[in-house]
Image (cartoon, rainbow, N blue to C red):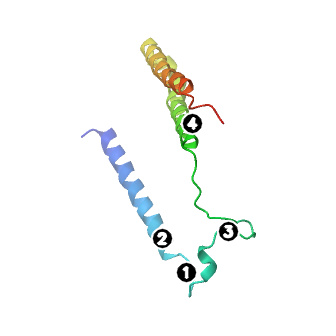
């Protein structure tokens, strides 16, 4: 096993160990009420009495907009490191990025034509 894989494995193990220690510490140090208060599960709206139920149905359009946002946010995560290393990557990397952005643009055009981006 190469040194880089050992370092990556050590990083993953330390990350999982740290997350476990933090969760265990938070559970051990948590402040708990001695007795249950009946209003503990009420909806809190800035000191105002709640109106209606807290479970409201959202139109699926909101989720489509959120997915499109995540799509282009992830695109940014891939383009930034590519742009920082463009000189060392060469011309093949430029062509590959054009293909990547082209596929994403096809998805964007598809969503646009289907009306998924229309806010009503």
Where residue 30 sits: x, y (%)?
A: 53, 75
Circle nearer the viewer, 1 or 2:
1
The answer to whether residue 15 is above or below residue 43 is above
Circle 4 residue:
69
* Secondary structure at numbered mark 3: loop
Asked whether the beta carbons under mark 2 and mark 3 sit within 8 Å of each other, the answer is no
Q: Residue furthest left?
A: 1
> How many residues crowd mark 2 within 10 Å: few (<14), some (14–19), many (20+)?
few
Q: Nearer the viewer, residue 35 or 98?
A: 35
Instruction: Please determine whether, in this image, residue 57 is positioned above or below residue 53.
Output: above
Which is closer to the viewer, label 3 or label 1?
3
User: What is the quadrant of residue 92 in the picture?
Assistant: top left
> Of tags 4 and 1, which is closer to the observer?
4
- Residue 64: horizontal and vertical position, in percent? 54, 38
Which residue in the protein does label 2 denote? 25
CA separation in Å, label 3 and label 1: 19 Å
Look at mark 1 in the image and give the residue it sits on.
32
Q: Nearer the viewer, mark 3 or mark 4?
A: 3
- Earlier residue among tags 4 and 1: 1
């Amino acid at each position: 096993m190469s040194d880089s894989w050992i370092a990556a494995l050590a990083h993953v193990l330390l990350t999982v160990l740290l997350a476990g220690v933090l969760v265990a510490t938070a559970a051990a140090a948590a402040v708990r009420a001695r007795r249950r208060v009946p209003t503990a599960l009420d909806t809190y709206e800035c000191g105002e009495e709640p109106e209606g139920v807290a479970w409201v149905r959202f139109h699926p359009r909101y989720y489509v907009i959120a997915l499109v946002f995540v799509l282009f946010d992830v695109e940014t995560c891939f383009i930034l490191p590519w742009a920082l290393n463009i000189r060392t990557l060469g011309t093949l990397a430029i062509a590959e990025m054009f293909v990547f952005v082209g596929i994403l643009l096809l998805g964007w055009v598809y969503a646009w034509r289907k009306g998924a981006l229309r806010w009503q």
